[in-house]
Image: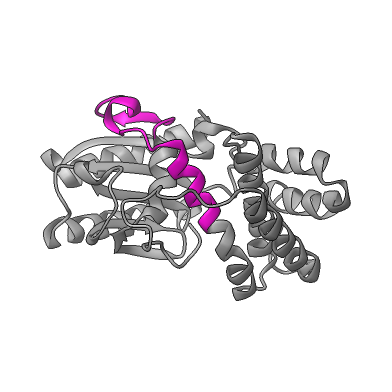
Amino acid sequence: MHPEAARVGTELADAIAAALGQDLVGLVLHGSAVLGDFAPHRSDLDLLAALRSDPDEQVLARLAALHQRFDRSHPHWAGRIEVEYVALDLLTGVDPSRRFARVSPGESLHLVPASDHYLLNRASARNGVALIGPAPHALVPEVPPVTVRAVVRRHVEQWPEWVRENEAPGFLAYAVLTLCRARLLLEHDRRGSKHESALQAEAELPEHADLVRWADRWWYDDGTDDGGAPRAAVLAFVDEQARELLAAHPAPSSPFADPEELGDTPA
């Protein structure tokens, strides 16, 4: 686990525990802080909090105040914290009639539907580190591999649209690396970091090696949105990879409890 992420994660865990008290069942740190290739000046801090029940208005108010205070006291991390506050019985459930609380980069604390869009975070948390409460494998039920693959495939379907919504170099680099990660999972049944996925794509897609290398360097070498970006090449890469991955990996027949529910923005 990355030491800086561990330090900040522990501070945030203490604040969450104080705000939630007995409502908190467990808290897990996951993502690149645990998986590897954590970039201290770029990566988000990803956490999953298991609650005894769906958050009510009082809980939401306490959590909103907590995150506002944390952003003020940790300005370097403001906008880089992602926490999902999910009722214990929803950790692998798909029930869009219910909501869980989420704070993420660019978004303050808000409620989102419990759709299958967010199951990848649950699968990631299974391999995380417990900051409070039970070990992740005891706290978070397994997300079936067929479901993980199906959610990734559905995201791949939407990336040709998503990538055209933002011209910022950082978003374009993120799009390239996300397609590389999707490729690693669908082609090799392996979840990897952005960097690991980029190295695999460079080796297997030599015609796109320069573009993938640009995205990888932008992400890990402190690239900024002030400069230019190879937008046309990124759009072509996303379109091509989406087309090829979708053709090579047909959708499974029934991977979801509600196959029509999926979020409409990239996670």
**Residues in magenta, as a range:** 126-154
Instruction: Please tell me whether residue 28 is drawn above or below residue 175 in the rendered image.
Output: above
Res 8 seen here: no
Between 82 and 267, the residue placed more toward the observer is 267
Image location of residue 242, percent across then percent down: 66, 59
Between 31 and 244, the residue placed more toward the observer is 244
Image location of residue 84, percent across then percent down: 33, 50
Instruction: Please tell me whether residue 160 is drawn above or below residue 82 in the rendered image.
Output: below
Which residue is most to the front? 253
58 to the left or right of 185: left
Q: Residue at x 66, y 62 (%)?
A: 170
225 to the left or right of 112: right
Is 131 contained in the magenta span?
yes
Way the structure is coloured: one colour
Q: Residue at x 72, y 43 (%)?
A: 198
Res 106 seen here: yes
19 to the left or right of 102: left
Image location of residue 79, percent across then percent down: 46, 58
Image location of residue 191, percent across then percent down: 57, 36
Is 122 contained in the magenta span?
no
Q: Residue at x 27, y 49 (%)?
A: 85
Quadrant of the rendered image containing residue 46: top left
Quadrant of the rendered image containing residue 10: top left
